[in-house]
Image: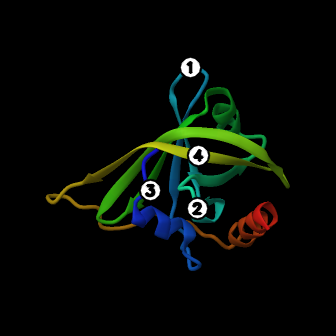
Amino acid sequence: MNKLPMEVLSVLNNEKRDNKVIFLLTLDSDYYPHVSLLSPYQMKANERGDIMFFVHSNSRTRSNLIERGKATIIFIVPPKCIYIKGKSSFIRNFDGESLFSFSANEVKVDYSEVSPIISDVKFNDERVKGFYLKLFNMAFH
């Protein structure tokens, strides 16, 4: 298991999480990458360094995670990008969402002094923030 970088822990566990887009890549049935866009509200790091996250229960992402159990999570944290490869395990369903645990096998950092990343990718969090905060509260309290 690789230790999660502090930048990732800050994105996932900070009480003032912002509306960054997090990319979750899985493998579809033909082994092509399948991209899902998640929010920091759908993810949280636990004390063991695993990432817990929710995806829609009827999504292709959920099926890919169940069938192949591998994923890459991409965090854009200017001036760099962090790729975390690992294995996922289904935990249970909550209110139309499926909770997974993700254990990192490899962490890579992509940074260029010549062309550093200068901004985040963000989304409107008005309709998701409260919902996922409630789900995590139900799941872990």
CA neighbours of label 3 inside 10 A, class few (<14), some (14 to 19), many (20+): some
Tag 2 secondary structure: loop
Q: Which label is found at residue 30?
A: 1
**2 or 1: tag closer to the N-terminus:** 1
Please report whichever mark, 3 or 4, sits nearer to the chain's N-terminal start: 3
Circle on res. 102: 4
Asked if the residue under mark 1 is in contact with the one under mark 2, i.e. CB atoms within 8 Å, the reply is no
Of pointers 1 and 4, the one earlier in the residue sequence:
1
Tell me the SS state at disc 3: loop
Inspect the image, locate mark 1, and give the three-letter code of the amino acid beneath it.
Asp
Question: At label 2, which amino acid type do we have?
Answer: Glu
Q: Which residue is drawn at 54% across and 73% down?
A: 18
Kindly tell me whether residue 70 is visible in this rendering. Answer: yes
Is the C terminus in the top left, top right, bottom left or bottom right quadrant? bottom right
Image coordinates for residue 23, horizontal then vertical, percent? 51, 50
- Residue 6 percent across, percent down from the top left: 41, 66
Instruction: Kindly report the distance in space between the C-alpha atoms of the residues bearing marks 4 and 2.
Output: 13 Å
Q: Residues within 10 Å of mark 1 (few under 14, many from 20)?
A: few
